[in-house]
Image (spheres, grey):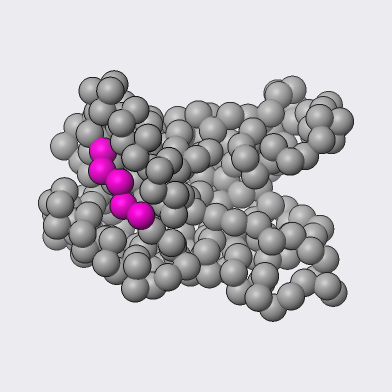
Amino acid sequence: MTLSGHVALVTGASQGIGRACALKLAKQGATVAVAARNEEKLNALVSEIAASGGKASAFTLDVSDEEQIKSVFKAAIGQLGKIDILVNNAGITRDQLVMRMKRADWDAVINTNLTSAYLCTQQAIGSMLKQRWGRIINITSIFGQTGQAGQANYASSKAGLIGLTMALAREVASRNITCNAVAPGFIETAMTSTLSDELKQKAVDNMIPLGRVGTAEDVANAVAFLASDEASYITGHVLNVNGGMLMG
């Protein structure tokens, strides 16, 4: 699977799944625009990609800010010529039971996880339409498929991403642009690092048939496949990367 000649932009690229996606896409030959709030981590990632022979540029971006999204995408297209692979990965959690959840925590999660994907896609879609080739990949979650107590905001945002994926897939299919989602299960990232070893082991023993927690690289491999020409006949699909936690 070669992505040579393509330009990818990955949001939330400074750590975790986003970072792994950027590394994998660069390894497959894509020029990668890495975007996130942490400039220091982004610069370190660009250096790592360059050291391995890849090409990358860093763009500081808070995806909850619409004006920042517009300016960063304009700068990235101006510098790199186009964006034809978009990975909407940026996400946050603000967990609380619904009866206690503050409106600000609801809004923050919806804006960061869902609205940003709509805004970023809006900015990138013109470049894809122009060349009649594109890949939009939204990082959703198993909890957008099953729900999760204490995560009504997060589950709603991730379920919304699935709906957005399918709507976009129908809108742009005639222009040779695909739109798919990847739904990770229990993945070892900074977001899950706060969970106790006991809880993680319980999840592995009782919920994950493959018997292990997933890695960010497992998710990145799925993203790279969906970005490739090998996945050209797949659109509107949710690819589960969850070790068998959800079947059917």
Which stretch did the figure color magenta? 56-60
Is 203 on the left or on the right of 139, as rendered? right
Residue furthest bottom as drawn: 103
Up-down relation of residue 140 to residue 112 (above or below): above
- Residue drawn where x is 53% and y is 69% of the image: 111
Residue 118, by quadrant, is bottom left
Q: Residue 175 appears in which quarter of the rendering?
A: bottom left
Q: What's the residue at 60%, 65% (across, down)? A: 109
How far from the left and from the top, in percent, is residue 59? 31, 52
Q: Could you tell me which residue is drawn at 61 percent across and 37 percent down?
A: 189
Q: Residue 105, how many percent across, how many down?
A: 67, 70
Q: Is residue 41 left or right of residue 94?
A: left
Query: Is residue 151 depicted above or below 18 in this figure?
Result: below
Q: Residue at x 53, y 29 (%)?
A: 218
Viewer can see residue 231: no
- Of the pair 46 and 142, the residue shown nearer to us: 46
Looking at the rendered structure, the number of numbered marks drawn on it comes to: 0
